[in-house]
Amino acid sequence: MAGFLSRREILKRAAAAGMTTALPVQTMAQALPSGARAAFENLNTSESEILEAIVARFIPSDENGPGALEAGAANYIDKGLADTLASSQAAYRVGLVALDLYARESTGEAFTALGPGEQDSVLEHLEQNRASGFQPDAASFFNMVLLHTIQGTFCDPAYGGNLDFIGWEMIGYPGIRLGVTAEQQRMDSFPEMTRVSAYDLQMFDADSTGERTDDG
């Protein structure tokens, strides 16, 4: 199985979600060295390994390129659990344990020890609400993690995900532009990727309260 969800399906869901991030400006991650993923700050080692395994199956790497794990989606979620995603912190801690317990009971192995196909089957059970031990239910946990994985993969890199612009390259988004030429507006035009965060532009900044300001 190539992955639990096809890239086509993920891109459809990403479009429906707006490919936006929930994190406010004051919690934007400092720029990471190219190719580096930040250490987890809120989830413990076991929880972080389970979360990384989940996001790796939601948007897997394949012959077309890297996926959500490489884009740092799990780190985006971990960082958010101390701030804007704080209301989901308990759901993550309970849900990650419940997922691993369900995997052990149904397969005899920890979720992280399963092969890709077996992990996909477990996640399918969650989506179909067939897995037990979740509060309020398995489907709610599945949809929460999927939404946050999409956010962390396709957000502006300033928010801690989309490392090395992996998400933008995946969908062919060329990046921030302040102006578009007539040539670039042609249907057969494929603009070169700028690889620039919106917050690399001087007109966007954050004051001490975390509100964006226009320095014009």
Image (spheres, rainbow, N blue to C red):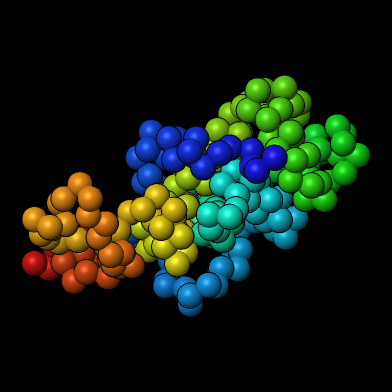
- 97 vs 166, nearest the viewer: 166
Q: Position of residue 74 (x, y in %)?
A: 57, 54
The residue under the point 18% across, 71% down is: 202
How many marks overall?
0
| Residue at the far right in the pictured view | 108
Decide if residue 159 is in sight here. Answer: no
Q: Position of residue 62 (x, y in %)?
A: 60, 53
Instruction: Quarter of the image for the C terminus: give it.
Output: bottom left
The residue under the point 22% across, 54% down is: 189
Decide if residue 154 is in sight here. Answer: yes
Give the side of residue 120 with respect to residue 26, left or right. right
Image quadrant where residue 103 sits? top right
The residue under the point 82% across, 50% down is: 113
Give the side of residue 138 with respect to residue 207, left or right. right
| Residue at the far bottom in the pictured view | 33
Give the vertical position of 15 relative to 182 (above or below). Answer: above
- 147 vs 95, nearest the viewer: 147
Q: Position of residue 178 (x, y in %)?
A: 14, 61
Give the vertical position of 89 relative to 43 (above or below). Answer: above
Give the vertical position of 17 relative to 150 (above or below). Answer: above
Give the side of residue 180 with respect to residue 8, left or right. left
Q: Position of residue 153 (x, y in %)?
A: 47, 52
The residue under the point 61% across, 34% down is: 141
